[in-house]
Image (spheres, grey):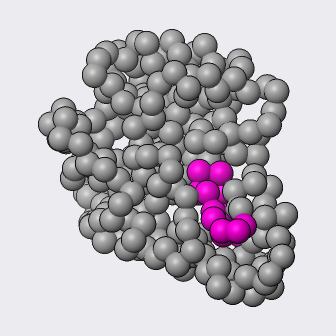
């Protein structure tokens, strides 16, 4: 027993003290910064390279809901018109707020990304239980969501937890592009969550289909029937992006 206590004391406090002020290593690809003034006339190299068609030109625009953050556009753009910052607070309550325009910086994006709703703060501001549904995902986002509850990130200290049954949940978190084989399971899970309930789309695949968007194996009708309350981009999502996004959403 004393040995266990000694080991615990040596470990110290392992959780990130202030999630809201935590930063990520500079190599992390977070919010993209675009500068259309550097673009060469008629150059379409970045758009042609993008595997998910997340980039459009004239005007230059990048959709984080489609972006897999591979970095090819930054690497191969001859004039460095696109660069990725380590800024990780990427969540948004509206789909079109994931569209990054030229000269949009971190402050401009973050100030308008998450719209705080009074009813959400009242219902879920102190406790939020979520049921995660892997709808054909690769297990990347699923692993990162699992990491949200580990000793480093400790999402549970904010009253936010994943639960085993949708009957105990306040909403669902969708990962994966929603394959046809998982479409009915997703619908059944959502139906089992008691009202009022929320929907969170975590990861590029859940938001737009990602690299599988054109696959005939997908069936994404669910998202046409029910509005998503919070979009969390990433491929995969980072635990700090997830936690900060949910805290913002709940008015914390």
Name the one closer to the observer, 202 or 114. Answer: 114
Tell me where residue 172 appears, x and y as whole percent.
Answer: 43, 29
Is residue 86 rendered to the left or right of residue 221? left
Q: Residue at x 31, y 71 (%)?
A: 21
Tell me where residue 128 appears, x and y as whole percent.
Answer: 27, 35
Q: Is residue 175 magenta?
A: no
Q: Residue at x 68, y 39 (%)?
A: 209
Dominant SS type (magenta): loop
Q: Residue at x 46, y 76 (%)?
A: 105
Is residue 248 rendered to the left or right of residue 173? left
Residue 197 in sight from this viewpoint = yes
Name the one closer to the observer, 124 or 223. Answer: 223
Tell me where residue 232 appears, x and y as whole percent.
Answer: 48, 49
Q: Is residue 150 above or below residue 188?
A: below
Q: Residue at x 39, y 57 (%)?
A: 113
Is residue 94 rendered to the left or right of residue 21? right
Q: Which range is magenta?
A: 57-72
Name the one closer to the observer, 198 or 152. Answer: 198
Q: Is residue 65 magenta?
A: yes
Residue 151 in sight from this viewpoint = no
Name the one closer to the observer, 190 or 35. Answer: 35
Q: Quadrant of residue 219?
A: top right
């Amino acid at each position: 027993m004393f040995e266990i206590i000694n080991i615990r004391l040596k470990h110290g406090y392992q959780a990130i003290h202030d999630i809201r002020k935590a930063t990520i290593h500079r190599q992390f690809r977070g919010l993209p910064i675009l500068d259309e003034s550097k673009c060469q006339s008629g150059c379409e190299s970045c758009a042609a390279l993008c595997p998910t068609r997340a980039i459009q030109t004239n005007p230059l625009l990048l959709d984080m809901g489609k972006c897999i953050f591979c970095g090819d556009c930054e690497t191969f753009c001859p004039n460095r018109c696109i660069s990725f910052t380590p800024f990780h607070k990427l969540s948004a309550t509206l789909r079109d707020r994931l569209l990054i325009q030229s000269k949009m910086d971190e402050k401009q994006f973050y100030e308008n990304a998450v719209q705080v709703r009074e009813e959400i703060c009242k219902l879920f501001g102190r406790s939020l239980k979520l049921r995660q549904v892997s709808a054909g995902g690769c297990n990347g986002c699923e692993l990162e969501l699992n990491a949200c509850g580990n000793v480093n990130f400790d999402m549970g200290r904010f009253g936010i937890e994943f639960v085993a049954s949708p009957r105990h949940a306040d909403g669902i978190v969708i990962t994966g592009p929603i394959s046809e084989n998982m479409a009915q399971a997703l619908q059944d899970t959502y139906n089992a969550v008691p009202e009022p309930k929320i929907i969170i789309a975590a990861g590029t695949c859940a938001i737009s289909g990602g690299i599988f968007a054109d696959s005939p194996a997908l069936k994404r009708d669910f998202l046409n029937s029910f509005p998503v309350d919070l979009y969390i981009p990433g491929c995969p999502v980072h635990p700090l992006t997830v936690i900060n996004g949910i805290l913002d959403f709940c008015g914390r």
